[in-house]
Image: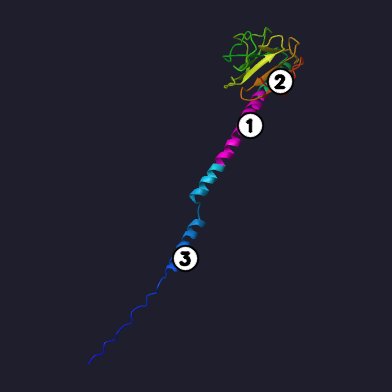
Amino acid sequence: MRKTLLRPEPSVKSVTPAKRIGRARRRSGALGAGGFTMIELMVTVSIMAILLALAAPSFRDFILNSRLTAQINDLVADISFARSEAAVRGASITMCASADLSTCVNAGNIWQTGRIVFVDTNSNGTREATEQILKRTDALGNSNALVASGFTRTERLSFKPYGGLLLSTGGSFKLCDPLLTTGRAVVVAATGRPVASKVPCP
């Protein structure tokens, strides 16, 4: 007679409700540790939006002021260049406002349209077709305004062969951005030497 061996059934561990709750909490804690909840994300985004709104005007002013500084430095460089060329060449050199970067504006005090520096062979302050252009500077290309005042002829500066202003009358340039209350200025003495500074606008 054969004996039948009975295999013991595997024991089944009972899982109580309390254990199930504990496992669920552990899983949810593990997920929360690696990310943000929706509320936390919304709060973070709101704070970032507020900070950006506060910083935007300051950043804009920084950009505009940097542009003003670059433009006024270009003007100082052009004046110094014209003065230096007059001394080096022993000839009259004129810097004038120009809309086409080839001929001079014959009247007015608006300089944001561009300017040229040329050898003024006949010292009349107007560029003739045969007179050499030494430097061209493009228009400002934005809403900034560059205005001359005080010079005998506000549409041009002419330098003597030794560097002083041909008409011996100094003056100034004022550069303003409509979005700023502080602009830049360049004062040019009768000797032809330019000095830049900050000024209120408009």
Q: Residue at x 30, y 84 (%)?
A: 6
For discs 3 and 2, the disc positioned in front in the rendered view: 3
Badge 2: residue crowd in 10 Å (few <14, some 14–19, many ≥20)? many
Q: Residue at x 63, y 31 (%)?
A: 62
User: Which label was assigned to residue 186?
Assistant: 2
Check the picture and name the quadrant holding the N terminus.
Answer: bottom left
Give yes or no for residue 56 being in the magenta stretch. Answer: yes
User: Which label was assigned to residue 22?
Assistant: 3
Locate residue 70: give its quadrant: top right
Q: Main secondary structure of the magenta part?
A: helix
- How far apart are labels 3 and 1 at the CA level? 56 Å
Q: Amino acid at mark 3?
A: Gly
Locate residue 73: give its quadrant: top right
Locate residue 135: give its quadrant: top right
User: Which label was assigned to residue 62?
Assistant: 1
Comparing 184 with 86, the one in front is: 184
Comparing 156 with 40, the one in front is: 40
> Which element carries disc 3, helix, strand or loop?
helix
Comparing 182 with 139, the one in front is: 182
Image side of residue 168 versus residue 129, left or right: right
Q: Which residues are magenta?
A: 48-73
